[in-house]
Amino acid sequence: MKGILIVTVGIPGSGKTSWVKDYIEENKDKNIEVISSDEIRKELLNDIKDQSKNKEVFDIMKERTKRSLSNGHITIYEATNISSKRRRALLKEMKKYYSKAICLFKYKNLIDCIIDNDTRSKRVPDEVIERMYKNIEIPHKCEGFDEIIIDYDIGRKLYINNRRKIGLGMDKERFTECDSYKEYINLLIELGLSSCVEMSQDSKWHNLSLSKHMYFCYKKIKEVDKLDKNLLIASMLHDISKPIAKTEDEENRYCHYYNHENMSAYDVINILIKYTKFCDRDIMDIAWLINNHMIFKNGYSSEKLVRKIGYLNYARLLALHNADNSAK
């Protein structure tokens, strides 16, 4: 008898542990077992913050997860799990033990995570939260999940439900019918992204301002595939977190934007929740495209990428990559 595997994904303070407690409370009639990295650290090291024996901690987690799934339990693999590569490896290792794999992506914006961190019993240094925010990779079914659930904090849930109930928020046409640069600038300002407007990129790779670069990228995509609205929206928002990712190289005076693709993907979720009426599936799709818009710079062969993400996603990301490269 195989169990059901639930893998939590989220930066510290996003509410993963609270979700697990609520899930157990709502499903008292089911056999649920929680395998927590924090609890194993506490067992081994008497300190959930001690990262000195991470390999041992996760080896124990995996063995306990296999045992729990083999007993037919709903098994919650509770950790931050921010790496797509590690999630793929986990699902591959657990494949013969589960009948279904679910990803629980717990989303809370960075500022709220840092504010709420002060009231947590398991407080972590703010710099740890910021580091994970810069490195989190948006989960996708191509990793091997049968289902992905995105869950928000209570306040955000109420906000979303109320807006959707009365039909508030921008629809996709507000984005995809931008026919001029002026219209695009107005959209950025409406979305609270005025810091992107005419920001100099100070880069040897880009001679256009940030807003012009994103706009021309959008225009290039529109020439190729104007029917894929999520791809169009991803193209016009793919670099929105460059203003906060920007660091200057004092030696050559050029600027770098390390991890901007991860940060932009994470931040776009908050923006789309706040200002649009998009469904969760579309929001996650747009965020995933943004998160992976630089994947072709990682040295993967085309064959390996197709196997990894599927041909359709490969074609979409290739279009985004080409548009990004040509918008200079």
Image: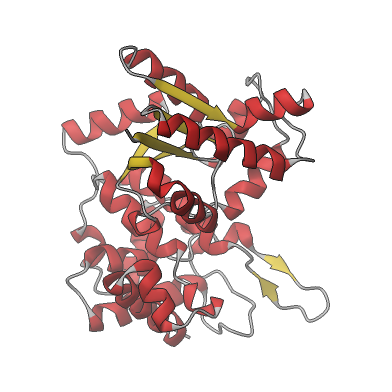
Quarter placement of the N terminus? top left
- The residue closer to the viewer here, 47 or 62, is 62
| Residue 131 in view in this figure | yes
- Give percent across and percent down for residue 71: 40, 28
- The part of the image, by quadrant, that contains residue 166 is top left
Q: Left or right of 176: which side holds 12?
A: right
- Give percent across and percent down for residue 233: 31, 64
- Give percent across and percent down for residue 272: 34, 48
Q: Is residue 153 above or below residue 8?
A: above
Q: Left or right of 270: which side holds 58?
A: right
Q: How many marks?
A: 0
- Give percent across and percent down for residue 280: 28, 44
Which residue is most to the right?
A: 251
Q: Left or right of 163: which side holds 206?
A: right
- The residue closer to the viewer here, 30 or 201, is 30
- The part of the image, by quadrant, that contains residue 180 is bottom left
Q: Residue at x 63, y 19 (%)?
A: 119
- The residue closer to the viewer here, 112 or 94, is 94
Q: Is residue 160 above or below residue 24?
A: below
Q: Residue at x 37, y 54 (%)?
A: 144
Q: Residue at x 35, y 59 (%)?
A: 142
| Residue 106 in view in this figure | no
